[in-house]
Amino acid sequence: MRYIFVGNRKFVLEEMLQHKLLISQVFVIANTHLAKNIKDLNIPYKLIQSKNQLLNALALVDFDILVSNGCPYVLPIDEASKKKYINIHPSYLPDLKGIDPVIGSILFRRNAGATCHVMNNIIDGGDIISQVKIPYSADLDVSLLYQLSFVAEKQVFTKALKRNFLPLEKQKESSNLIYYSRCSEDRIITFREGNQELISKIKAFNNKSQGCAFHYRGKEYKVFDIKILDNEYLRQYTLKFDNYQIVFVYEDCIVFKKNKEVIQCFRVFGELSCINVGTYINEY
């Protein structure tokens, strides 16, 4: 069997190489993580800048199975020759379709995972070949879940390979499923969110290239971590503070009271010297 790989990350491609599959061509999406480190794999590849470029390149390659892992383009499968087209998606489909399911898992406190499925003309909508579930737990953040998802993607590819990529079941749609692709507004916090929502939002964007932004007295700050503090002495001390009132500002941390809980935001970047104890975290 002759394979083509199309994608933006290396982990499934590494698994294909580990299995010594016959790979006719590797198409790497430009300006992605894979484009930055593909040379480390020491294999031939072609950078792809657009959907049209990819379609023209596919027409020139003889293959049996196309493996997509992070391909941003919807391919015209119905118009294509009768090959196998499969996709590895980092969620437990049919939940969390879309571009950013790993972020969505943390943001909405949903189970994560990986799914190998048949590609069709519906985004992330084809029959399921294999799956691995990563149950949601409150100790996960997006940075760790990305690492777990990369492992799960390798696992579902190997499971699918052992099944000769034969579909196992159709996706079962229901009303409580989430489609998630991030937008810039998702990273803005106002501190009017519920405490659990606030924690989930910051954990969903805590990798170093993102962070959540908030504004205090006209200045913007970024925060990357958060936790609720339970120390009894601290809780007693904060009884005299109002809701949203700042208790401490030190190093890269802000401690404030919110909804009868004491919250610590840390790894906060910005002019912390301008944030004053006794003022309110939601002062704009």
Image (cartoon, rainbow, N blue to C red):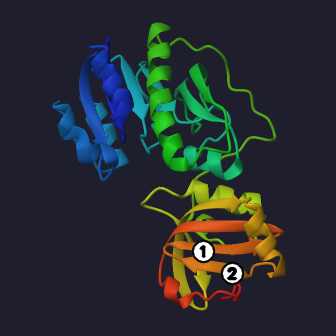
* Image side of residue 245 versus residue 127, left or right: right
Q: Quarter holding the N terminus?
A: top left
Q: Which mark is residue 254?
A: 1
Which residue bears the numbered disc 2?
246
Classify 279 as above or below 91: below
Residue 124 on image: x %, y % = 57, 35
Q: Which mark is residue 119?
A: none
Identify which residue is drawn at 40% across, 22% down: 81
Residue located 38% across and 25% down the image: 66
Residue type at numbered disc 1: Ile
Q: Where is residue 89 shown, x and y percent of the image?
A: 52, 34
Against 273, is 77 above or below?
Answer: above
Residue at image position (60%, 82%) is: 215
Is there CB contact under 8 Å for labels 1 and 2? Answer: yes
Residue 251 in the figure: left or right of residue 238: left
Crowding at label 2, few (<14), some or many (≥20) Cα neighbours within 10 Å?
A: many
Q: Amino acid at mark 2?
A: Ile
Dot 1 crowding, Cα within 10 Å, few <14, some 14–19, many 20+: many
Residue 149 % position (x, y):
50, 35
Q: Nearer the viewer, residue 202 or 114?
A: 202
Q: Could you give the CA–CA distance between mark 1 and mark 2, rounded to whole angstroms?
A: 7 Å
